[in-house]
């Protein structure tokens, strides 16, 4: 097999550009969380066995941004957004951002640090913080999941409501009693329910 840099197949070779047997019906680019600076391939493998689409946390914000830009600039059509506990808003003025100071995994200070890592001295734009966008009309259908004790909770809910007001089909799921990133606890019943729901939602989104 002829491979180019980084092990990728070179174009033009027999079989290099053939689709999988049976033909693919959709594709998902999954963008991982990690406060814009943490995480790697190994941390994401449990979630990318055809069961997660869009992204989680910072990855969900990074997934929402190209959907917004593609809509604004008539780019490639995006079929569906799956935003799991999305980090969409850089300003620290929501109630959870101000009050969740000691929650597991992510709290007020770690969220503030993640935006500092991501933005540096540059001002936030809607393509960095999609909640800043003035117009959400024309965006693709979305599923948004939030956690009760997550600093990102209210910005995710608010984004979903704004999408609804812009006549975008939205499914909102607020998981009571959970914190940011509970799916890391693979044995927990609620984690298994969330993982199953993400997979089913993604299948519906790509089939619709």
Image (cartoon, rainbow, N blue to C red):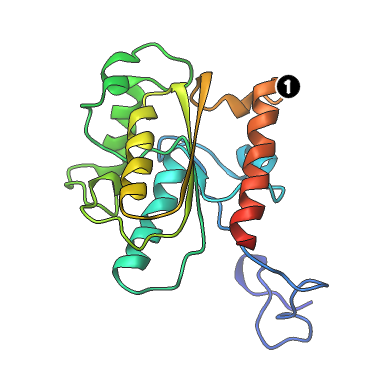
Residue 5 lies, with reference to residue 38, above or below; the image says below
Q: Which quarter of the rendering shows the N terminus?
A: bottom right
Q: Foreground residue, 46 or 177?
A: 177
Residue 185 lies, with reference to residue 115, above or below; the image says above
Image position of 174 (left or right of 187) = left
Instruction: Farthest residue to the right: give it.
Output: 21
| Residue 189 percent coordinates (x, y) | 70, 21
Instruction: Farthest residue to the top: give it.
Output: 102
SS at badge 1: loop
Residue 7 lies, with reference to residue 63, above or below; the image says below
Residue at horizontal 47%, vertical 55%?
A: 141
Q: Residues within 10 Å of mark 1 (few under 14, many from 20)?
A: few
Which quadrant of the structure image shows residue 14?
bottom right
| Residue 62 percent coordinates (x, y) | 41, 50
Which quadrant of the structure image shows residue 97?
top left
Image position of 179 (left or right of 26) = left
Residue at horizontal 25%, vertical 44%?
A: 119
Image position of 106 (left or right of 4) = left
Q: Which quarter of the rendering shows the C terminus?
A: bottom right
| Residue 15 percent coordinates (x, y) | 78, 82
Q: Foreground residue, 101 or 155?
A: 155
Image position of 103 (left or right of 10) = left
Residue at horizontal 65%, vertical 38%?
A: 197
Total of numbered circles in the picture?
A: 1
The residue that disc 1 covers is 187
Residue at horizontal 62%, vertical 63%?
A: 27
Residue 40 lies, with reference to residue 206, above or below; the image says above
């Amino acid at each position: 097999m002829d491979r180019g840099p980084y092990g990728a197949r070179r174009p033009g070779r027999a079989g290099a550009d053939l689709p999988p047997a049976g033909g693919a019906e959709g594709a998902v680019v999954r963008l991982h969380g990690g406060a814009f600076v943490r995480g790697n391939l190994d941390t994401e493998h449990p979630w990318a066995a055809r069961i997660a689409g869009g992204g989680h946390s910072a990855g969900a914000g990074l997934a929402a941004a190209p959907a917004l830009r593609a809509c604004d600039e008539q780019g490639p059509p995006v079929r569906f957004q799956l935003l799991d506990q999305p980090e969409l808003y850089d300003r620290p003025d929501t109630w959870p951002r101000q009050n969740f100071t000691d929650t597991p995994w992510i709290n007020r200070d770690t969220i503030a640090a993640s935006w500092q890592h991501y933005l540096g001295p540059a001002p936030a734009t809607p393509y960095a913080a999609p909640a800043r966008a003035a117009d959400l009309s024309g965006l693709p259908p979305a599923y948004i999941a939030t956690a009760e004790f997550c600093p990102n909770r209210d910005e995710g809910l608010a984004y979903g409501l704004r999408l609804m007001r812009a006549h975008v089909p939205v499914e909102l799921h607020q998981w009571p009693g959970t914190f940011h990133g509970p799916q890391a606890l693979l044995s927990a019943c609620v984690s298994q329910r969330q993982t199953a729901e993400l997979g089913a939602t993604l299948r519906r989104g790509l089939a619709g």
